[in-house]
Amino acid sequence: MPCMRAMFLATSRVALDLLGRPEVGKAWDEPSALAEFTVRGLAGHLTRAVGSVEAYLDRDEPPADQVIDAAHYYAAALATVDITSDQHAAIRQRGEEAAAGGHGRLVQGFAAQLDRMAVRLPREAPGRRVQVFGDLVLVLDDYLLTRLIELSVHMDDLAVSVGVPPPDLPPGAYEEAIACLVDVGRARHGDLAVLRALSRRERDGVDALRVL
């Protein structure tokens, strides 16, 4: 199985362990550390990182024209970081809907999704393409990288929200996530802006490294 697929599955299992912690259930209806999200909404949003993969694999494979990479997916799909926008409100609503059945049901459903993905992902062709949000087309492994980022970022959010240590991620997961997020900044603002954000913050007029 390609490295990204194995890393995605391993990171998803870490997310399952975190979601199953009793602290998550106890704080279910409380505000989370992520602005405008409840703990349950954040937990639901976290599970969608896997559920979306399954949903998009159920679609017919799109043609190979206009394929983009993971960084350009974020640059195109996430139009704004303004949490009051309609796009972000819809994201929060989908998280709430995913968690509507309660903590135990969410964890059980997520575990079942992971079991299905563990069987399915190794069978997909190396260059398998998926058509995702906004009708954007990515190679499967590039889309899994975007989901790895979502898992990594939101596991930290959830752990902070319920007062437990952030879980350790599989080797290489942080490196992959960080490299891609820097590339999102490059795609949006250009290399000079990212260089300044990393080395000359007084010249960082566009907040080039804030990409989510």
Image (spheres, rainbow, N blue to C red):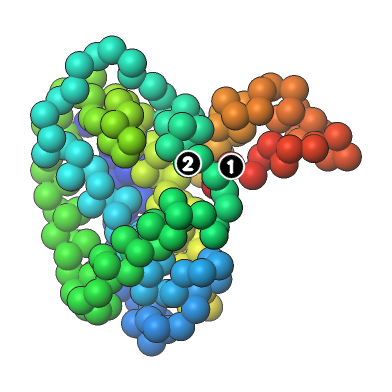
SS for tag 1?
loop
Of the residues under marks 1 and 2, which one precedes in the sequence?
A: 2
Circle on res. 78: 2
Q: Position of residue 103 (x, y in %)?
A: 27, 78
Total count of labels: 2
**Vertical order, 75 against 40 (above or below):** above
> Foreground residue, 171 or 50?
50
Which residue in the protein does label 1 denote?
211
Which quarter of the rendered picture does the N terminus lie within?
top left
Is residue 12 in view from this perspective?
yes
User: Mark 2 and mark 1 in contact (Cβ < 8 Å)?
Assistant: yes
**Vertical order, 192 against 149 (above or below):** above
Is residue 164 in view from this perspective?
no
Looking at the rendered structure, the kind of residue marked 2 is Leu
Mark 2: few/some/many CA within 10 Å (<14, 14-19, 20+): some
Q: Position of residue 81 (x, y in %)?
A: 57, 48
Which residue occupies the extreme bottom position in the image?
26
Residue drawn at 35 percent across, 64 percent down: 93
Q: Is residue 26 left or right of residue 182?
A: left
Looking at the rendered structure, the kind of residue marked 1 is Val
Q: Position of residue 61 (x, y in %)?
A: 15, 25
> Foreground residue, 109 or 99?
99
> Foreground residue, 13 or 128?
128
SS for tag 2?
loop
Q: Position of residue 104 (x, y in %)?
A: 22, 78
In which quarter of the view is residue 94 placed? bottom left
Residue drawn at 24 percent across, 14 percent down: 64
**Vertical order, 201 against 50 (above or below):** above
Question: Whole-Å distance between the Cαs marked 1 and 2?
Answer: 9 Å
